[in-house]
Image (spheres, grey):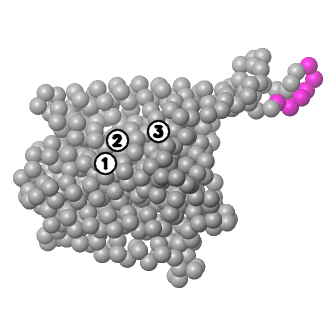
Amino acid sequence: MSPARTAPWLRVAPAVFLLAWGGNHFTPLLHLYEELGHYSPWQANLLLGLYVVGLIPGLLVAAVLSDRHGRRPVLLAGLAAGAVGSILLGAGLHSMVLLCAGRGLAGIGVGVAMSVGASWIKELSAPPHDRLAAEGAGSRRPSLTLTLGFALGAAVTGSLAQWGPAPAVVPYVVHLVLVAAAVLPVLSAPETVGHRARPSGPWWQDLRVPSIGHRRFTRIVLPAAPWVFAAAGVAYAIMPAVVAPGLDGWATLYATVLTVLTLGCGAAVQPFVAWLDRRTRGRALSLGMVLMVLGMVLAVAAGLLRSPAFALAVAVALGVAYGITVVAGLAHVQAIATPQDLAGLTGVFYALAYSGFLLPTLLAALLPVSPYPASLAVVALVCVVCLAAVSAGLWRLRRQSAAATPRAPGPRSSGPRRAGSPPGARRRRAPGR
């Protein structure tokens, strides 16, 4: 299909997909690096989470630069960072310095994909670029593209590492070739910033994101966001280590299966999150957090049983929780943000989400004093507290929305009481920022 006939958002999606691929294809190789590179478990998990160091500036600074200079040049720079990251990782099996640098660059690429790429896809999923987009497409398409990149990247890399030659090199070469192929579609995608009034003054002043102080963000999004990738990290970084004694040489393949299962379940549920939100009257984020608690409790049981089969159930529960939470959280972000700070607030959301990816490193470092079942039990309790905070925030939001909705006039009263409004409730103005 020629670029002119390709939907505009689909010209950006391959780059976002491959940057996500580059961020996660290291995951199924953790056991390989411990065996071939002779790294300790905490070092391997440190490398897994280290790309958060690159990801956060990739999220925040790239968002600001894209608001000033356009989405295209910043996304192309992200592709370059992802490509160089794969080169360093492919050359760095026995060099912690090269591996750290490669993971940092991969993080920058993922950060660009999550802020700039996600914002660009969202903008291209609305008129005038896409007049037929379904409800929720602006939040569903970028999150689904990222999730598929995370999942398929891990699947291909894990398969190549298990059965292919040079398992610490070939997966990165494959990724490098695909990244080069993604450049051309990006060059043909419509720029969405060109006709907008661009900010003046030093660029670092734009790192301020006014919407970050919105009560909907602080009370609802903030308590849920870190669990997005905490769930993924527990499912496909902690669980393989917990059940490793029973894998008999299949650790890489098993880690790959868990990664794909977790992210595949997350991808499968994402198209239905908008429907779930309607059916639960705006409580999809609470539902995601309930499943998060369930998944963490199952992870504690898996740590006690050390059963590879039981760990698959953990991956399913946490994968579905991940998929619901990331889309529902992003929908709240997009409801809050203005066109001027959409990319910035999206970047803050994903920075918070990715902070949870440091959880496996923390739990691995605590192993000498706290085995996985004990530390995961504490994690489950903290998750319950965050669930309570999110549910309370959504309850307040619903009450405020009901109170602010005008009621039809009727005899003897101002109209029928809305569901969820207390008898005799008086109308109030919607709270501001």
Marks 3 and 2, the one that precedes in the sequence: 3
Q: Which segment did they paint magenta?
A: 407-412
Give amino acid for label 2.
Ser
Residue at (53% x, 72% y) in the render: 189
The secondary structure type at the circle numbered 1 is helix
Q: CA distance from mark 3 to mark 2?
A: 18 Å
Q: Which mark is residue 52?
A: 1
**Which residue was labeled with disc 3?**
288
Marks 1 and 2, the one that precedes in the sequence: 1
Asked if residue 279 lies left or right of residue 152, the reply is: right
Please identify the dominant SS of the magenta region: loop
**Which residue was labeled with disc 2?**
355
Q: Is disc 3 in contact with disc 2, using a CB cutoff of under 8 Å?
A: no
Q: Position of residue 89 (x, y in %)?
A: 20, 62
Residue reaching furthest to the top:
424
Front disc: 3 or 1:
1
- Between 102 and 289, the one nearer to me in the picture: 102
Residue at (66% x, 30% y) in the render: 431
Front disc: 3 or 2:
2
Q: CA distance from mark 3 to mark 1?
A: 23 Å
Assess disc 3: are there few (<14), some (14-19) or many (≥20) residues with their C-alpha within 10 Å of its C-alpha.
many
Give amino acid for label 1.
Val
Asked if residue 221 lies left or right of residue 317, the reply is: right
Q: CA distance from mark 1 to mark 2?
A: 7 Å
Q: How many marks?
A: 3
